[in-house]
């Protein structure tokens, strides 16, 4: 999550410090023998200490960013550190006060100053802590809204990809050619096309499906591509049985295959070979790079869609490897226990 700096208005800090300094001199003003010099020094010492407490606690909060649940709880360690350092600072300020007003009995003054310092430190620490918690809650709310917006965008882009009019147009053209030539596979083509769009309707509302179900979608999709490109397109799947029970965002593989078809030459003279296999704890989609000559600039919608879904659902990232000879996409394996 992107963090902005936690800030408190300098006006609040200085006005409250000056006010506390003046407030600390009220008892002396009420005394019969009022001493303006003592009141001024006492106010200055209290005001300076209040300024220190403000800036020290703000600095320590910035130095300890909230990154997990444990850090969001009340920090007794920071409170004790603040109190101990505050006692030391107030001791130094009281010593300065003793040097300026040498006629005052140091013992009672020190006790009064230290008690006052502890009270100021406690009140300010609690106040700053509450403000900081409120600030962090606002940051989390903003981040949740941003993530929700990204997820909606990803779902919208996924839906556009699933009902890609170019794909449907090409499929219908292929079907027309098959029917005109009395191709015996035309009925199978219609069934696979129907199955593909049925999978689309059934799976588009799910966040994750089993890899075995995803491969059923891929099988239907590849049949349509095979009918269109014949031997110009091959897909090799070497995924093991144990990996079929893992999870994957629906239509991830179909989007990756579509991405390969979109950016590479696919022909009988230059067939496109796509491999799908597992490597360590990743699912890998691989193809040789043979870019189209007059390829239009890509917006990267497909890969962005997949990356957004992995980041949003699982806080995991996909890996893209391209050495201009082989193009690889590595997808993190999602196990059932991780999802639950």
Image (tube, rainbow, N blue to C red):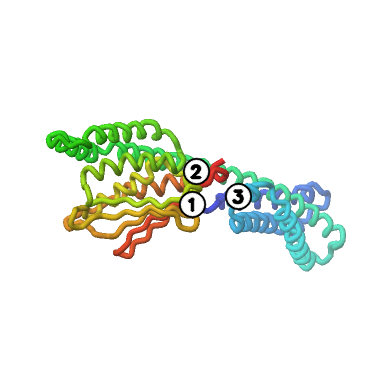
* Labelled disc at residue 245: 2
Residue located at (48% from left, 48% from top): 243
- Which of discs 3 and 1 lies nearer the camera? The answer is 3
Q: Are marks 3 and 1 in contact (CB under 8 Å)?
A: no
How far is disc 3 from disc 1 in space, using C-alphas? 14 Å
Residue identifier under label 3: 68
Residue 140 percent across, percent down from the top left: 53, 44
Residue located at (82% from left, 54% from top): 112
- Which of discs 3 and 2 lies nearer the camera? The answer is 2
Task: Give SS at disc 3.
Answer: loop
- Which of discs 1 and 2 lies nearer the camera? The answer is 2
On the rendered structure, is 250 left or right of 45? left
On the rendered structure, is 28 left or right of 155? right
Can you say whether 312 is above or below 57 in the image? above
Q: In which quarter of the image is residue 163?
A: top left
Q: Which residue lies furthest to the front in this view?
A: 184
- Looking at this view, is 158 or 94 the one in front? 158
**Label 3 vs 1, first from the N-terminus:** 1
**Label 1 vs 2, first from the N-terminus:** 1
Residue located at (40% from left, 41% from top): 214
Residue identifier under label 1: 2
Residue 31 percent across, percent down from the top left: 82, 49
């Amino acid at each position: 999550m992107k963090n902005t700096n936690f800030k408190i208005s300098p006006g609040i800090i200085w006005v409250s410090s000056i006010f506390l300094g003046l407030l600390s001199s009220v008892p002396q003003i009420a005394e019969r023998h009022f001493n303006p010099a003592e009141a001024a020094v006492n106010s200055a010492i209290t005001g300076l200490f209040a300024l220190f407490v403000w800036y020290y606690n703000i600095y320590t909060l910035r130095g300890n960013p909230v990154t997990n649940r444990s850090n969001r709880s009340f920090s007794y360690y920071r409170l004790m550190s603040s109190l101990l350092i505050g006692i030391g600072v107030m001791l130094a300020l009281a010593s300065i006060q003793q040097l300026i007003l040498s006629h005052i009995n140091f013992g009672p003054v020190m006790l009064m100053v230290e008690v006052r310092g502890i009270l100021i430190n406690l009140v300010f620490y609690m106040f700053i802590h509450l403000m900081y918690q409120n600030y962090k809650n606002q940051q989390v709310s903003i981040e949740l809204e941003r993530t929700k917006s990204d997820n909606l965008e990803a779902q919208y882009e996924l839906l556009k990809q699933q009902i890609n009019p170019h794909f449907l147009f090409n499929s219908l053209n292929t079907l027309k050619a098959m029917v005109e030539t009395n191709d015996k596979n035309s009925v199978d083509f219609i069934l696979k096309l129907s199955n593909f769009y049925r999978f689309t309707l059934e799976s588009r509302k799910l966040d994750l499906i089993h890899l075995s179900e995803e491969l059923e979608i891929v099988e239907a999709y590849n049949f349509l591509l095979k009918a269109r490109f014949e031997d110009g397109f091959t897909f090799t799947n070497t995924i093991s049985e144990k990996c079929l029970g893992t999870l994957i965002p629906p239509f991830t593989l179909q989007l990756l295959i579509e991405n390969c078809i979109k950016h590479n030459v696919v022909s009988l003279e230059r067939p496109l070979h796509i491999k799908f296999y597992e490597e360590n704890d990743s699912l890998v989609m691989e193809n040789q790079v043979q870019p189209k000559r007059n390829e239009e600039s890509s917006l990267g919608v497909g890969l962005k869609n997949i990356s957004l879904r992995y980041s949003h659902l699982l806080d995991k990232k996909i890996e893209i490897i391209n050495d201009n000879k082989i193009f690889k996409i590595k997808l993190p394996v999602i196990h059932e226990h991780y999802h639950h």
